[in-house]
């Protein structure tokens, strides 16, 4: 019999309880408790039809498909004041699959070096006097998965089309690409391999223990072509922010892609990029689905969204203001989101009668996990 096709239900059924490390066990706990009695919540009542509803809090875990929609909207709202009236370019720097084993052993090190290498590559091209001769800006988002939940580590980067020169002038890019792809690829390859050799020498890859493995793998990687993708983006402020927001809080799998859970099998939809981007269906054993999903749990404290150059947090406001003055553009003012007043939720109609507004009449305290609960949630009435 088909069950609810959600990641939460799959974890409830197939997630191991005693073989996970602390971080993955914590993430599973968050996702299993999300929007259930375990998180606590509110009791709301319609002012028109007196219907009562229980709304449970989200876990806000960055791996949770139920919580990332709101996080995406909030992030996009904050970023609208950080865009420029220029063309933007979307670049993707992909780590060769040969390094997937090292990612498993040293995720913090590899991810950090990936960010560092991608930015060092673009920074060098931007500062080249034969190209732009100035400072670029870059926002980068780490993704670790492919459509079939396999490990596929890559950075999505959004770069404004121009550079801020040392003399305070702005030099605009021309054409539908930022820099030649092949040149970017080879420079990125050299940077990443060099940093990996340095990390190995300094003992930061100490879990790679096979004799000669570091040199043999890095030598082989230098003899292959690496993948860097680039394309021209849009130059409308709202569109650019929404475009990047599609990537910032995306997770390895969403509930919309999970088609069914039957017996011991999970069916999911994926896009096969090697077959003309055709949509296909994949069937995985439940334990294998969970294993693949947990491959993409990020180390605690790792920042998966980072800003560089004139978009870096420490100098962004000052340098963006300088660029806008040069471009003779009006200062962008971030729009502020609506705030709740009192216990009401403005603009949210009652789903029952569609006429009244919902307001809070009680708070529900968080409970123990649902599998350990023996009574209904405690209620505090206002």
Image: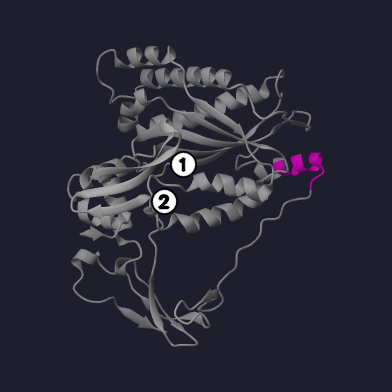
Region in magenta? 320-329
Residue 323 colored in magenta in the image:
yes
Left or right, 63 with respect to 227, comes to left
Look at 49% across and 17% down and name the residue there: 190
Residue 11: image x %, image y %? 26, 53
Can you identify the residue that label 1 sits on?
304
Left or right, 334 with respect to 3, comes to right
**Label 2 element class:** loop
* Residue 62: numbered disc: 2
Left or right, 247 with respect to 19, comes to right
Look at 33% across and 36% down and name the residue there: 150
Residue 26: image x %, image y %? 29, 51
Q: Does residue 21 appear in this view?
A: no
Residue 362: image x %, image y %? 40, 81
Look at the numbered discs 1 and 2 and tell me whether their residues touch, using CB distance below 8 Å.
Answer: yes
Indicate the quadrant containing the C terminus: top left, top right, bottom left or bottom right.
Answer: bottom left
- On screen, residue 363 above or below 295: below
């Amino acid at each position: 019999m088909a069950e609810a096709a959600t990641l939460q239900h799959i974890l409830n059924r197939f997630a191991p309880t005693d073989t996970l490390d602390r971080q993955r066990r914590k993430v599973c706990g968050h996702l299993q408790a999300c929007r259930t009695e375990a998180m606590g919540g509110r009791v709301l009542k319609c002012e028109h039809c007196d219907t009562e509803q229980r709304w449970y809090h989200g876990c806000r875990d960055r791996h949770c498909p139920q919580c990332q929609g709101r996080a995406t909207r909030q992030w996009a709202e904050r970023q609208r004041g950080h865009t420029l009236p220029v063309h933007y370019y979307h670049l993707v720097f992909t780590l060769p699959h040969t390094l997937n084993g090292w990612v498993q052993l040293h995720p913090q090190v590899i991810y950090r070096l990936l960010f560092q290498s991608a930015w060092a590559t673009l920074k060098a091209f931007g500062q080249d006097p034969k190209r732009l001769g100035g400072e670029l800006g870059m926002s980068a988002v780490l993704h670790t998965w492919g459509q079939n939940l396999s490990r596929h580590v890559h950075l999505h980067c959004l770069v404004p089309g121009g550079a801020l020169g040392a003399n305070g002038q702005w030099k605009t890019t021309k054409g539908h690409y930022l820099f030649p792809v092949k040149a970017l690829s080879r420079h990125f390859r050299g940077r990443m391999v060099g940093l990996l050799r340095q990390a190995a020498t300094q003992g930061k890859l100490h879990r790679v223990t096979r004799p000669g493995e570091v040199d043999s793998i890095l030598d082989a990687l230098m003899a292959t072509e690496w993948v860097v993708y680039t394309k021209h983006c849009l130059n409308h402020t709202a569109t650019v922010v929404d475009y990047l927001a599609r990537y910032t809080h995306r997770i390895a799998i969403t509930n919309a892609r999970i088609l069914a859970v039957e017996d011991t099998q999970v069916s999911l939809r994926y896009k096969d990029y090697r077959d003309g981007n055709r949509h296909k269906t994949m069937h995985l054993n439940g334990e294998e689905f969970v294993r693949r999903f947990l491959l993409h749990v990020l180390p605690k404290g790792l920042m998966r969204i980072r800003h560089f150059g004139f978009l870096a947090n420490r100098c962004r406001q000052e340098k963006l203001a300088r660029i806008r003055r040069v471009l003779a553009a009006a200062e962008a003012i971030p729009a502020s989101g609506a705030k709740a007043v009192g216990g009401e939720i403005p603009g949210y109609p009652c789903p029952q009668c569609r006429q009244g507004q919902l307001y809070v009449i009680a708070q529900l305290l968080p409970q123990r996990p649902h599998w350990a609960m023996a009574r209904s949630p405690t209620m505090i009435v206002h």
